[in-house]
Image: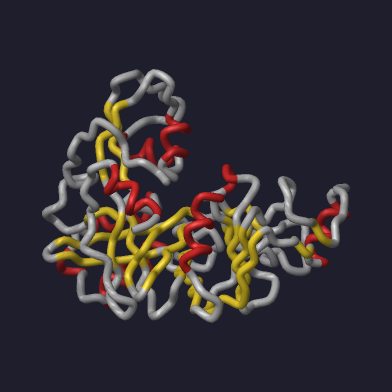
Amino acid sequence: MFGWIAGLAVAGLTLAAAPAVGAQGLPTMVGQEWIYQVRAEDTLSRIAGRHNLSPRVVRGLNGLKPGTRLKPGQSLRLSTRRIVPPAASAAIVINIPDLHLYHFRDGRLAGWYPVALGQPFDTKYEPDPKRWQTPTGSFKIAEKRENPVWRVPKSIQEEMAAEGKTVYERMPPGPENPLGKFWIGLSKWGYGIHGTIAPSSVGRYKTHGCVRMKPEHIDRVFGGVQVGQAVRIVYEPVMVLTRGDEVWLQVSPDSYRKVSDLRTLTRRKLQSAGLTGRVDLKRVDQVAKDRWGIAIRVDPQALPPLPPATPSAAPPERL
């Protein structure tokens, strides 16, 4: 097992999900909900960043107002529960609104990792403000390179010049190379999955369209995929999952503005799945409004805002 799944197991916590499904199966869920005890050195931003959550989500989960100062020993409810898109025979699936990459081996989930993706809009470039958005579609792994040379695309050279920066045509491997140590090139020329020298950008929309991973994460994925394997990049801001009588809903921000109304899309997905009669519609609408990007139970039996969490002496480790 790789990624945060392994980290949760090491920490002795139980995954809030059924076992990973096969490549052709339905979505599954990963992650954990727990109670975190605030430490003296903690701030809300540090806690959120440590677990790839935004401060807004941590405040929302705990009913905190912006600017609230935490106190040592204070209990915070945290959740990293996420719904995993079906692999559909792909080795890698990336959900853009979710800002996560899901790695599959032999049709089973092997790891899940936060990523940085393409900037939503380049307002300074009128011909194509969407030019840096990460593309969706089905691709193949075209190449794998360790210690890659960065051959800078013309569009990025032009941006460098416009911003008064030094313009590079190519950058050799080293501490200044933004590709980091590993490059997984896709069949769409110029796009790939790679490491970074700016790990703090992961979990945000900061790239020119590529998929950026933390060094310790790209290392695992690079060694676990082969040239020719499939990569799916999807745009699914609304994900639904059932587990017995439970109905789970995940609504993420529509960062690329592809959806006219998230509330309408959410209700439509529940209706298409035949689940409208199995959910609390007020809770559904609240999840669509909050857009926290984590999976939340919306069936009438769930306790608001989330099911009870089991206190833990330590939060899940992030690898």
Q: Position of residue 143 (x, y in %)?
A: 62, 74
Which of 133 and 5 lies nearest the eye of the viewer?
5
- Name the side, left or right, on which 195 lies relative to 122: left
The quarter of the displayed image where residue 270 is located: bottom left
Q: Is residue 54 above or below residue 133?
A: above
Find residue 174 and report its horizontal and vertical position in percent. Answer: 73, 50
Q: Is residue 216 above or below residue 60?
A: below
Residue 59 screen position, x and y as percent: 38, 36
User: Along the line of sight, which residue is nearer the eye, 2 or 50?
Assistant: 2
Question: Can the viewer see residue 286 in this picture?
Answer: no
Quadrant in the picture for the N terminus: bottom left
Q: Is residue 74 visible in the rendered structure shown here?
A: yes
Q: Residue at x 48, y 74 (%)?
A: 232
In the rendering, at what x and y percent does residue 9 appear? 27, 48
Q: Quadrant of residue 169?
A: bottom right
**Residue at 45% across, 69% down:** 93
Colour treatment of the image: secondary structure
Query: Looking at the rendering, which quadrant does residue 117 occupy?
Result: bottom right
In the foreground, 17 or 245: 17
Residue ID at (47%, 39%):
49
Judged left or right of residue 98, residue 83 is left
The answer to whether residue 120 is left or right of residue 262 is right
